[in-house]
Image (cartoon, helix red, strand yellow):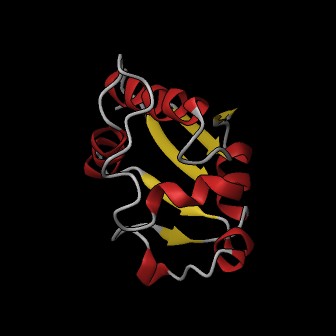
Amino acid sequence: MEAKKKLVIVITRGLDDERSSVAWSIANGGINAGLDVSIFLASSGVDWVRKGAADNVHLNPMDPSMHEMIKKVMDNGSVISVCPPCAKVRGYSESDLIEGVKVVGSIAIHEQLLAGAAALTF
């Protein structure tokens, strides 16, 4: 069996930026296309996985709600990682984040890129 192709999506935009909706929509599309999708959140992008933060956000009426798109990524078993300094400056620890989200350095991205993953940044 051939290994799935990998896609890393880096999201640096927060709850008020429609580019985030595009990023999560592309992540969902990648999952639908059979890609192994990973998300790395940096800067204000870390706010997406703070417990309850995305529950009532719907940036693009043509997309599912942000909560639904994030849930699909999580339900797929995709890895969602958060930049440690970005979380710390906001006062977040892993206990403030959705269950399953990990605070881990950019080495998580580098390993995947070295293994041939494609990357998109928003």
Which residue is more in the foreground, 104 or 13?
13
Q: Is residue 47 left or right of residue 10?
A: left
Q: Is residue 21 left or right of residue 114?
A: left
Question: From this viewpoint, which residue is outermost toward the top?
Answer: 62
* Spot occupied by residue 81 in the image (x, y as percentages of width and height): 55, 61
Position above or below: 59 against 42: above
Q: Is residue 118 left or right of residue 92?
A: right
* Spot occupied by residue 68 in the image (x, y as percentages of width and height): 27, 40
Which residue is more in the foreground, 52 or 25?
52
- At 32% from the left and 47% from the top, the residue drawn is 56
Q: On the rendered image, what quadrant is the C terminus found in? A: top right
Say which quarter of the image contains residue 47.
bottom right
Say which quarter of the image contains residue 43.
bottom right
- At 54% from the left and 32% from the top, the residue drawn is 23
Position above or below: 2 against 86: above
Q: On the rendered image, what quadrant is the N terminus found in? A: top left
- At 47% from the left and 40% from the top, the residue drawn is 37
- At 65% from the left and 74% from the top, the residue drawn is 90
* Residue 41 in sight from this viewpoint: no
Position above or below: 1 against 55: above
